[in-house]
Amino acid sequence: MKNRIIIKKVGLILGTVFVCSLFIFATSPQESEVSKIAVSNFFPAKVDFAGEGTPLEISDVKERLDRELLVNENLHASTILILKRANRAFSIIEPILKRNGVPDDFKYLAVIESGLVNVVSPAGAKGIWQFMPETARERGLEVNENIDERYHLEKATQAACAYFLKAKEKFGNWTLVAASYNAGETGMKKQMDIQKVTNYYDLLLTEETSRYVFRILALKEIMKNPAQYGFVMTPESGYEILPIKKIEIDSSITDLADFAKTQGINYKILKIHNPWLRESKFLNTLNKKYQIEIPLKGY
């Protein structure tokens, strides 16, 4: 009986020591250092959009950028996928922006709109540049049941450039142009008139538009300096740019699966490289000229 009491007492003492050691370890200097590292994120000394400086000396501006940097820095899988996709998508987007005299930074607008994939928004916007049907048609894109050129990256990028250049004439400022892509030209102008300011960073806007340019700035910063934000990328990390040939078509194709086989690929691969073809056949009653891309390797 006496031995049992001694054993119980020893057990209580050891248990108390164990609990205390856990408490001490949880508040030890080593753990404090880890916490400091976790919250001590890198913040750039200066940033800009299309050469237009961001006033980081303004408290709320700095905090809004910090928020977007932290969010995207910690969305590990999403940000890594964007970094991988950029290798392929930017090779198409960049030359078109340059050819139209649109600043290269607008490629990051496409990043935050879609993650560089052909997504569909709840409102019905589609493609990497997220055009609504009517807006797409206004910019010269063909949108119907058979063809949807919002999914044609080259043509959609050209349509986006047309918007940017038109908006630049109205606002005279690339940052406002970028914000208006989200809020609309009319919406931006209305708020500028009400608030009597002409600078994006001085405007009080809806949360989505208020975050919009900062999301662009954050992705630009992370994508230009991935290692600084913990993303280790090698030249081989990006998705491969596959060589292609373009076939000009000026008539209908009754069966795209059969057509794909004549080109040495299958229906799936044909649709991956030509997502603007929306059905299993291609109707071209007006005999317009279209170009279909056929990959030369990778399959």
Image: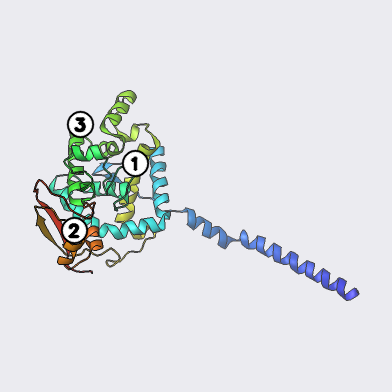
| Residue 184 on image: x %, y % | 28, 34
Q: Is residue 9 visible?
A: yes
Q: Residues within 10 Å of mark 3 (few under 14, many from 20)?
A: few
Numbered badge on residue 212: 1
The CA span between labels 2 and 1 is 43 Å
Q: Which residue is mark 3?
A: 170
Q: Which quadrant does the C terminus fall into?
A: bottom left
Q: Which quadrant does the N terminus fall into?
A: bottom right
Q: Secondary structure at mark 2?
A: loop
Is 177 located above or below residue 279 in the figure? above
- Of badges 2 and 1, the one in the foreground is 2
In this image, 74 relative to 145: left or right?
right
Is 150 located above or below residue 232 in the figure? above
Given contact means CB atoms under 8 Å apart, are the residues at marks 2 and 1 in contact? no
Q: Which residue is mark 2?
A: 255
Marks 3 and 1, the one that precedes in the sequence: 3
Given contact means CB atoms under 8 Å apart, are the residues at marks 2 and 3 in contact? no
Q: What residue type is disc 2 on?
A: Asp
Q: What residue type is disc 1 on?
A: Tyr
